[in-house]
Image (spheres, helix red, strand yellow):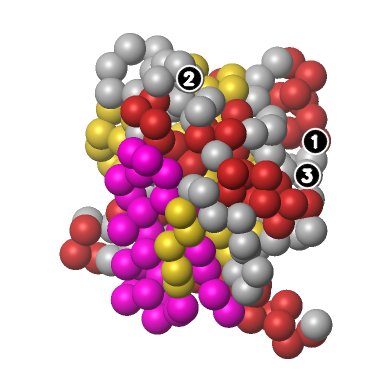
């Protein structure tokens, strides 16, 4: 099993993700430059946070044209596991691999702090180590984390259980009071209909060791490994 961490010009969380996979989870991992086109041998791909192409135009709107993205789309279409974190989530939205768009934070300020998110769906390859409604403490660091989708799209996300995480209080209360950026329906993370592509604004790689103040994000990666290990057994 091997993971790949995509590196765009302006990525700044690629090394964090690489470290978690290699040194914390002890799994093989390799960097994927944004101009690479060969994704053979990878079981999971991570699009990390950062400021791809300086966030010119809209966040992720230039990175989605990088040569690697067509091949990531093909990888996802075939059922490959893809995680987009923060800027990676924004890129997945721009590339059409996830529905919706990302707007500026409603306060028009960059936000960097720990928040709480609620596990809305624990029956996924990304959340099988969590309990339903489990509250996680994970940091955010973004200027454009205000998720938006039209009414029909939101209804579809709800009906298909594609909303994976919502911003909440420490006790799991979901309300606008605990919404840091104005995201519609307090949405912090969603997945595609097939359940193999996850996008989330909070940074699980920054909460994968207790020394960082929280280990809650560790189990997102652990869930993926558990799922992939099971797949290798049954294939």
The numbered disc on residue 193 is 3
* Residue at the image point whose x is 64% and y is 34% from the top: 95
Q: CA distance from mark 2 to mark 3?
A: 25 Å
The numbered disc on residue 28 is none
Which residue in the structure is indicated by mark 1?
Answer: 159
Q: Nearer the viewer, residue 179 or 91?
A: 91
Q: Residues at badges 2 and 1 in contact (C-beta under 8 Å)?
A: no
Q: CA distance from mark 3 to mark 1?
A: 10 Å
Mark 2 residue element:
loop
* Residue at the image point whose x is 37% and y is 40% from the top: 9
Q: Earlier in the sequence, mark 2 or mark 3?
A: 2
Mark 1 residue element:
helix
Q: Residues within 10 Å of mark 3 (few under 14, many from 20)?
A: some
Q: Residue 159: image x %, image y %?
A: 80, 35
Whether residue 22 can be seen here: yes
Judge from the rendering whether residue 156 lies leftward or rightward of residue 200; answer left or right: right
In magenta segment, residue 26: yes
Q: Residue 94: image x %, image y %?
A: 60, 29
Whether residue 134 can be seen here: no
In the picture, the quarter occupied by the N terminus is bottom right
Which residue in the structure is indicated by mark 2?
Answer: 58
Question: Which callout, 3 or 1, points to the residue nearer the camera?
Answer: 3
* Residue at the image point whose x is 39% and y is 31% from the top: 53
Q: Residue 158: image x %, image y %?
A: 73, 34
Q: Is residue 139 above or below residue 209?
A: above
In magenta segment, residue 214: no
């Amino acid at each position: 099993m091997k993971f790949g961490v995509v590196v765009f010009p302006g990525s700044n969380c690629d090394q964090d993700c690489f470290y978690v996979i290699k040194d914390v989870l002890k799994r093989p991992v390799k960097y994927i430059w944004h101009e690479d086109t060969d994704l053979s041998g990878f079981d999971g791909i991570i699009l990390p946070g950062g400021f791809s192409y300086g966030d010119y135009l809209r966040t992720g709107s230039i990175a989605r044209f990088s040569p690697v993205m067509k091949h990531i789309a093909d990888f996802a279409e075939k059922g490959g596991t893809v995680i987009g974190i923060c800027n990676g989530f924004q890129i997945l939205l721009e590339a059409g691999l996830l529905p919706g768009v990302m707007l500026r934070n409603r306060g028009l300020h960059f936000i960097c702090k720990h928040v709480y998110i609620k596990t809305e769906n624990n029956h996924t390859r990304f959340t099988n180590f969590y309990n339903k409604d489990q509250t996680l403490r994970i940091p955010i660091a973004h200027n454009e984390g205000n998720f938006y989708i039209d009414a029909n799209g939101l209804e579809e996300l709800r009906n298909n259980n594609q909303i994976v995480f919502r911003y909440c209080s420490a006790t799991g209360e979901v309300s606008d009071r605990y919404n840091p950026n104005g995201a519609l329906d307090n949405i912090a993370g969603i997945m595609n209909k097939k359940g193999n592509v996850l996008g989330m604004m909070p940074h699980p790689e920054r909460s994968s060791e207790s020394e960082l103040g929280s280990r809650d994000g560790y189990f997102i990666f652990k869930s993926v490994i558990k799922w992939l290990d099971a797949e290798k057994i049954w294939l």
